[in-house]
Image (cartoon, rainbow, N blue to C red):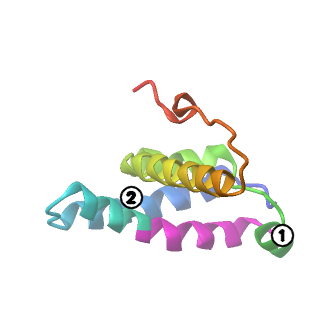
C-alpha cells in the first residue's frame, strides 16, 4: 500500500466535507433516506479511495483495508455511516447464521458481539 501522508488525508477530508455539504442541503424525509444516500455514496467513494492507495493485487486479491487514520475520517464527516455499517454487520451475521443452520451447523452467535455500548 502506498504510504498515506497528511496531505492525502487532507484531500480526503476536503472531498468528504464537500459531500457532507451536499448531503446537508438535501431535504430528506426520513432517516432511512439519509442512510440510503450515505450507502450509495460510500459504495462508490470507498473503492475509488482504495484504488488511489492500494496496489491492484491488494485491491482485488488480498484482505487489505485502508488504514484507520484515513477510515476514521469517514465517520467524522458522516457519523451516520457507523449506523449503516452496524446494520450491515447485523445482516451479515444473520445470513451467516441462516447458512450454518441450513447445513446443520448450529453454532451459536451471541447478539452480545453485535451490541454497542452507546
- 104 and 116: which one is in front? 104
Which image quadrant for residue 56? bottom right
Please provide percent x and percent y for residue 106: 68, 43
In the drawing, does residue 112 fall left or right of residue 82?
right
Q: Residues within 10 Å of mark 1 (few under 14, many from 20)?
A: few
Magenta-drawn segment? 40-55
Lateral position of residue 82 relative to residue 46, left or right: left
Residue shown at the point (47%, 46%) measured from the top left: 86
For image coordinates 69% across by 70% down, the residue present is 52
Determine the image quadrant of residue 28.
Answer: bottom left
- How many angstroms separate mark 2 from mark 1 (CA)? 31 Å
- Specify the farthest residue to the top: 117
Residue 17 is tagged as 2
Residues 83 and 69: in front is 83
Mark 1 — residue?
61
Query: Of the residues under marks 2 and 1, which one precedes in the sequence?
Result: 2
Amino acid at each position: 500500500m502506498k504510504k498515506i501522508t497528511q496531505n492525502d488525508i487532507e484531500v480526503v477530508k476536503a472531498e468528504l466535507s464537500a459531500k457532507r455539504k451536499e448531503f446537508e442541503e438535501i431535504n430528506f424525509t426520513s432517516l432511512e433516506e439519509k442512510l440510503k444516500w450515505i450507502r450509495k455514496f460510500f459504495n462508490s467513494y470507498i473503492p475509488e479511495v482504495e484504488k488511489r492507495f492500494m496496489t491492484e493485487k491488494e485491491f482485488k486479491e488480498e484482505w487489505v483495508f485502508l488504514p484507520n487514520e484515513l477510515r476514521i475520517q469517514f465517520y467524522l464527516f458522516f457519523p451516520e455511516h457507523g449506523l449503516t455499517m452496524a446494520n450491515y454487520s447485523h445482516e451479515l451475521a444473520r445470513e451467516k447464521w441462516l447458512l450454518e443452520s441450513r447445513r446443520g451447523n448450529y453454532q451459536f452467535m451471541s447478539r452480545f458481539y453485535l451490541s454497542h455500548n452507546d
